[in-house]
Image (spheres, rainbow, N blue to C red):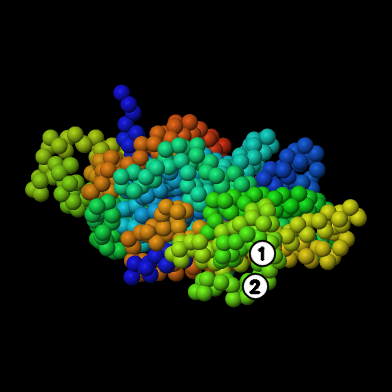
Amino acid sequence: MALDAQLLSRLQFAFTIAFHIIFPSFTIGLASFLAVLEAIWLVTKREAFQRLYLFWLKVFALSFGMGVVSGVVMSYEFGTNWSVFSRATAGVLGPLLAFEVLTAFFLEASFLGVMLFGWKKVGPGLHFAATCLVAFGTLISAFWIISANSWMQYPTGYGLDAAGRFVALDWWRAIFSPTFPDRLAHMVLAAYLSTALMVGAASAFALLKDPRQPESRIALRMAVGMCLVVAPLQLLVGDASGKAVERLQPAKLAAIEAFWDTRAGQPLHIVAWPDRSTAANRWELSIPKLGSLITAGDANATVKGLKDFAPADRPPVAVVFWAFRVMVGLGVTMIGLGVWGGWLWLRGGPERSRLFLRAATLMGPAGFVAVIAGWTTAEVGRQPWVVWGVMRTADAASPVTSGEVSASLIGFLVVYALVFTAGALYILRILAAGPTVAGTAPAAAVARAPGSALGAVPDEPS
Amino acid sequence: MSLDLPLLWAMVIALAVFLYVVLDGFDLGVGILFPFARNPADRDTMMAAIAPYWDGNETWLVLGGGGLFAAFPGAYAVLMPAFYLPIVLMLLALILRGVAFEFRSHGRRSGKRGWTIAFAAGSLIAALAQGLVLGAFIQGVNVRNGVFVGGPLDWASPYCLLTALGLVAGYALLGAGWLMVKSSDALHGDARRWARIAAVVTALLLAVVSVATLTVHPYVAARWGWTGHGFDLGRLARLAIIPILGAAGLAVLARGLITGSHRWPFAGAAMLFVSGYLGLAASFAPYVAPYSLTFRDAANASSALVLLTGGLVVILPLVLGYVVFVYWIFRGKVSADAGYH
C-alpha cells in the first residue's frame, strides 16, 4: 500500500512540476524581452515597439498567471507528498526556498500589478522600472530554485545531525554547490531560447499572412538574432554541465549515454535500446570513441559504465537516454534555425523565405519540449536518490494513503488539463490576431489592459 | 543576551498568515460575493477592484507555507500530510480562481461565463478549504514520534465545518468592506447591504466558534479558564482584551455602516479578524502542531534560522515597503478606465 501512495506521489510531482516549468521558462524570457522592448520604445519613441510591448504583455499576463498558480502548488507539495524529505532537508533547503519567496515572488507579484494596470497611474520611468523589477524577480527566482535543485544533485556544505537530518555547515558551499553555476546558466539560456522561438514563431506566422507586417518583421529579427547567439552558447554551457555530470554523477552520465561497461574509448550511441534486465543495449548505432571524447574530453579516457553501480543504485536508463537525445536533437535544430535565419537576414530578410517562416512557426514549442526533456534527464537521472548519494526517493514520501494521492492526482489532471487547454487557446488566439490588432485599433476599442476586467470584450449574457 | 530565533520566527509566520488572511481574505471575499452582483458590468468592476493586488496577496500564503518549511520543518512535515485533502482542494480552487482573472477577459460568451463561475466557485471553495484546515488545526493533530499518525479524514468534523462557514462569512465581510472602499454608485450600495448581512452572520458564527473552541480540546479550555461549568475569572481576565477588541471592531463596523462611511467598515472588519486571530492563537500557543509539537520542538537547525533571520532583516522591510507603495499607487475608487491604452 505504501508503495502505491509513493508511486502516485512521484507521478503527481512529475506531472505538476513538468506543467509548471513551461510557464517560468516562458516568463523568464518574456519579462526580459518586454524590458528590452520598453527600453527601446522609451529611447527611440518608435510606436512599433510600444505595440510589440502591449502585444506580448497580454501573452505575458496569461502565462504569468498560470505560472503563479501552478507554482503555489509546488511550495505545498513538498509537505503534502514528501514530508520526510522536507523534514530531513529543511536545514539546507528551507532558507533557499524561503529566500525565493522573500526576494523574488513578492517583487514579481507586486510590480506585475504596476506593469499590467499602472500604465495610466504611474509615469513611463516608473512603469519601465516595474517591468525591469519583474524581469529581475524572475531571474532571482531561477537563482534560488536552481541552487536548491543543484544541491539535491550534488550536496555540499552540509553535515548530518543525530537524527539523520541535513544541517548546513557552510552556507556558501551549500548555495553554490558544484553543479549550480553551469545549471543556472543552462536554465536561463533555455528560457531565453524558448521565448525567442515562441516570439519567432508568432512573428513568422503573422508574416506568412502578411510579409510586410512591420512589428512582426522587427520581432522576427530580434528572435533570429537571439537564436543565433544563444543556441550555440547553450551547446557550450550544456557541454560544461555534462562534463560536471561525468565527474560528479557518473551513474547519471552512464544512463544518459547508455554505457554499461566501464572502459576506455567509450563509443557514442546515437540511438540505442537500453535494457535494464540484461544490463546491455539490445541494439545500438554507435560511433567508436566519440563517447569518451564528448563526455570526458579525451577519446581514450575511461568512462564509468552502469555495471559499476549496484542494480539498486542505477537510474532508469531508457528514459534518461532518450530524454537527453530529444533535448540535444532539438538544441541542434535550434542552432540550425538560427543560422538559417541569420543567413537569410544577410540576403535581404528572413521573411522572404516562406519555407523558413513555416519552419520557424513549427519550432515555436520546441524550446518547451527541450526544457521538459532536459529536466527529465536531470531528475530521472538523479534516481534512485532524491538527494544524490545520501537520501533515497523511496525513503522520502509522506505518511499519506494511496486513496488521498489518487484523489489529488485526478484533481490535478482534470484541473490542469482544463487550465492548460483554455490558456493555450487564449494565447494562440492573441498570437493569431497579431500585434496590429493589439496596438493600432481605434483608441476607444483598446481601452482594456491585459488582465483588466473592464473594457471592450463583450460581457457574458446577463 | 541572544535573540530567541524560534520565537522571532513564530511571530514572523504568524504575521505572514495574518496578512494573508486579511489581504487574500478580501479578494477571496469579492469572489464569494460575485454571484450576487446585479450585472456583468458590476462583476467587471468587482474584479478590477482586486486585480492589481491578488497575486501579491496570495504570496503571503506562499510565505506562510515556505516560511513554515524553512523555520518549523517539524510542523510543516506533520501538518501538510495531516491536512492533505483540504490543502489540495484549496490549491485546485486557487488555481481556478487565479487564472480566471486573465481568462475571464479572454473568453468569449460561454468561456467568459465559465470563468465567472470558476472565479466565484474557486473563491468559495478555497475559503471553505482554508476554514477546514483552520478547524482541523485547532482540533489538534495526531502525532507520534514527530510523524503524523492520524487518518485522512480527521478534518471532516462538525467543528471544522463550523470554522469553514465562519471563515467564508468573514471573507465575504472583508470583501464587502473592500468593495465599499473601492466602488461607487449602485455597486457601493450593494456592497453596503452585503456588508450588513455578512457582519451579522460573521458575528454570530464567531460567537459560536468561540464557544465551540472551548470544548474542542482540554488545553484550550484550560487556557481560557473554562472549567466545564464556569470560567476561572482570573485566567479569563488575562485574555479579556481579545474579546474586547472584537467587540470594538464590531462597533466600528456597525457605526461605519450606519453613518455611511466608505472606509471604516473595512477597518472594523479587519479589527474583528485581529480579535478572532488572536483568540485562536491564544488558544493553541505555543504549539505549532497542536497539541504535540511546540514551536521549539519543530524549529529548524540554528544555522538555518540564523541565515533566515539575516535575510529577513534585510528583505522584509523592503517587501513591506513596496507592497504598501503598490497599494498606494492604486489608491482611490476603481474607475471604468482602470486599464490603459
Q: Secondary structure at mark 1?
A: loop
Above or below for A455 versus A362: above
Q: Image check: B179 left or right of A403?
A: right
In the rendered image, is residue A289 in sight?
Answer: yes
Q: Image check: B313 left or right of A303?
A: left
Q: CA distance from mark 2 to mark 1?
A: 10 Å
Residue type marked 2 = Glu
Q: Chain of mark 1?
A: A
- The residue shown at (69%, 37%) is A124
Tally of numbered discs: 2
Which residue position is annotated with label 2? A284
| Residues marked 2 and 1, same chain | yes
The residue lying toward the viewer, choosing from A434 and A149, is A149
Task: Give yes or no for contact between labels 2 and 1 (Cβ–Cβ under 8 Å).
Answer: yes
Q: Image check: A285 left or right of B75?
A: right
- The local crowd at label 1, few if under 14, some if 14 to 19, many if 20 or more residues have their Cα within 10 Å, is many
The residue lying toward the viewer, choosing from A139 and B98, is A139
Instruction: Determine the image quadrant of residue B109.
Output: bottom right
- The residue shown at (77%, 46%) is A49
Mark closest to the chain's N terminus, 2 or 1:
1
Per the rendering, the mark at residue A267 is 1
Q: Position of residue B123 (x, y in %)?
A: 44, 57
> Where does the N terminus of chain B fall, quadrant-wise?
top left
Q: Image check: A3 left or right of A221?
A: left
The residue furthest bottom is A282
In the rendered image, is residue B338 in sight?
Answer: no
- The residue shown at (69%, 61%) is A290
Residue type marked 1 = Pro
